[in-house]
Amino acid sequence: MATTSIPGMHRTNLTGSAPFLQQLTRLLVLCCLFFSQAGSATEADEAEKIHVNADRMKLNIETGNSIYSGNVKITQGDLVLTGDTVTIEQHDKLVERINVTGKPATYTHVMAGSEPIHATSRRMVYTSSEHRLVLIGDARLSQPDHTVTSQKIVYDTLRRTVVAGNEDRDTPVPADERVNITLTPKKKDVKKKNAGDDTSPAPETVQ
């Protein structure tokens, strides 16, 4: 089990040369982009450490790319990302793309003053430069008042917009790939009538 806490790298059971640990530290600090650049992270979340937990890890020191596998869990405050395998790709020493696969992969975030967002799919791709989370395969994105399901959902974490369905408008969409939306109306408080206010007629007596 590979477990890492950010910042400081003071709590880790990974061993290796100094360059390896320096590269690993830099890589995991850059993982903050997945959370802080999402545009919806709360101040409390940003102040929290980032924890990466997995059964195994493989790091390419030259490119900075890394692969985590086996019950992978990334957390920061109230934001949680899980999957069977997580691949982190870098470009110019910055995290550019995070690929997550799972059965299913999950994304959960609770934002201050807003309803929690929960997403699941067989694959997730987050592109930090575009603030875009793409859910592929049995995708579901939900909040308490609505749920969207489709084979593909694109969630803009900065603008908080959702686009679902096939992008090719000229291609017929099979029934099992159509977009489904479920809206849940908020329940109104219903005050119980007092017994003295009951004006319903008394039941008839059968003789």
Image (spheres, rainbow, N blue to C red):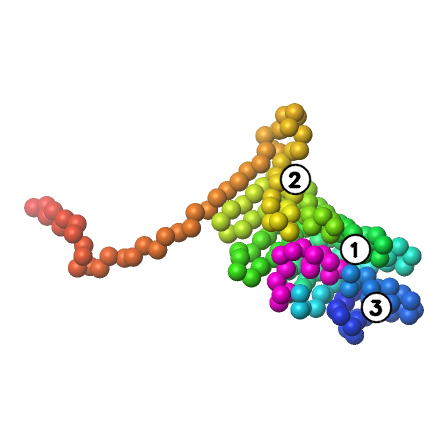
From mark 1 to mark 3, how far is it between C-alphas?
Answer: 21 Å
Image height check: is 77 above or below 155? below
The magenta segment is 31-45
Residue 175 can be seen in this image: yes
Q: Secondary structure at mark 3?
A: loop
Q: Is residue 90 part of the magenta span, yes or no? A: no
Q: Mark 3 packing: few (<14 Cα in 10 Å), some, or many (20+)?
A: few
Q: Nearer the viewer, mark 1 or mark 2?
A: 1
Q: Nearer the viewer, mark 1 or mark 3?
A: 1
In the image, 61: left or right of 29? right
Q: Nearer the viewer, residue 42 or 54?
A: 42
Farthest residue to the left: give it: 207
Residue located 70% across and 68% down the image = 49
Residue 103 can be seen in this image: no
Q: Give the residue pinned by disc 3.
A: 14
Q: Give the residue pinned by disc 2.
A: 152
In the image, 190: left or right of 80? left
Q: Give the residue pinned by disc 1.
A: 95
From mark 2 to mark 3, how far is it between C-alphas?
Answer: 37 Å
Image height check: is 9 above or below 101? below
> Residue 115: image x %, image y %?
53, 56
Quadrant containing the N terminus is bottom right
Residue located 70% across and 56% down the image = 37
Q: Earlier in the sequence, mark 1 or mark 2?
A: 1
